Amino acid sequence: MSNWNYRSEIDGLRAIAIVLVLLFHADLGFEGGFIGVDIFFVISGFLITGLILNKQRKNEFRLSEFWTRRIRRILPASILMVALTLAYGYVIFMPWDFVKLSRIVFYHQCLVANVYLWLHSGYFETSTELNPLLHTWSLAVEEQFYLFYPFLLIWLGRFRESNRFRVLSVICLISLVGSEYVVRVDPKTAFFLLPTRAWEMLLGGLISFLPELKSRSRKFIEIVSVSAIIGLLLCGWNYHEQMAFPGFVAAVPCLLTALFIYLNSGYLTWMGRLMSTKPLVFTGLISYSLYLAHWHFCDMNTD
């Protein structure tokens, strides 16, 4: 996409994602609300790839600037969340439990919380509900991806964009097929680790290479755009913890997310305008902070 402007409907999409996660962890009916994380992955892949591509086209991309922006966006809220979690744990936890919490904090700060949780827990296990940093696995997956991803795009920068698109498509497909295989033999590995999750962010990234959608069939685009959001809500309602996830099952909400983003690239559909309303945009803008804090409130709600 040649133009790289702020798109308010994507913040509305973030709002859908965080609400699904909140409803899932609050046990309010959306048993598949965990797909909100997958929506975040696709959105993040789209935004970051678009940012890097736009800079590359102007010959202005700098790794130091990229990582500085990521640190400024993520670190302050993360540090506050960790500090409050440690204070809460010091008061509430038994000494051994506080030691375990401190270990998770250390691995979180090293961007490998997902690896630690992969080795020591499972996301849907009852015991993990008492882990106030369980949700940091997804932050680790994302940051690991963006630690290496820019180097891939820099290396691909020597080729035409059509060839870059093909290479990233192949990597995305390999990761997706690998995710489907691993989720059958080792579900916990498929859930927590980057290789079986990378395809979700790559899928979002691939949209950035596509031209803005221009179609005479506006009515069809409107219908599909509405259907994409309805489909995401249905996935959030009907999916459940016993499903083999991620794998091909996760491809449904991820593709619906990617489809909505692309359908609104040329102009805002009716659903795009709805997703751009102030309440949804505001919720989307604070979704990262809500995600950091939500596990504590859900945990206290279950005590």
Image (spheres, rainbow, N blue to C red):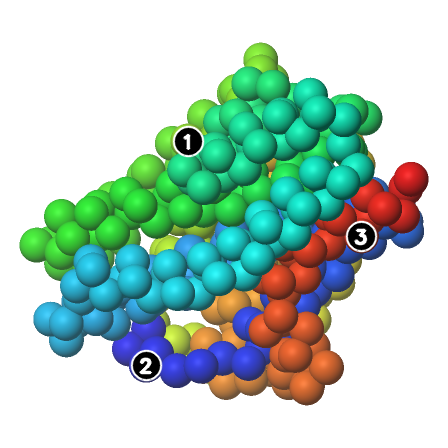
Secondary structure at badge 2 equals loop
Of the two numbered discs 3 and 2 in the rendering, the one whose residue sits closer to the viewer: 3
The image quadrant that residue 48 belongs to is bottom left
Q: Secondary structure at mark 1?
A: helix
Residue 221 shown left or right of residue 23 in the figure: left
Task: Give the vertical position of 27 relative to 197 (above or below).
Answer: below
Q: Secondary structure at mark 3?
A: helix
Q: Which mark is residue 158?
A: none
Residues at discs 2 and 1 in contact (Cβ within 8 Å): no
Q: Which residue is mark 1?
A: 195
Q: Can you identify the residue that label 3 sits on?
A: 297
Nearer to us in this view, 94 or 34? 94
Say which residue appears at 25% left-offset and 72% top-offset: 54
Which residue type does callout 2 highlight?
Asn
Q: Is residue 162 left or right of residue 80?
A: left
Is residue 247 something that shows in the picture? no
Mark positioned earlier in the residue sequence (1 or 3): 1
Residue carrying label 2: 3
- In the image, taking residue 170 as reference, residue 161 lies left or right, namely left
Task: Report x, y in % for residue 11.
Answer: 58, 73
Residue at 54%, 28% (x, y): give it: 103
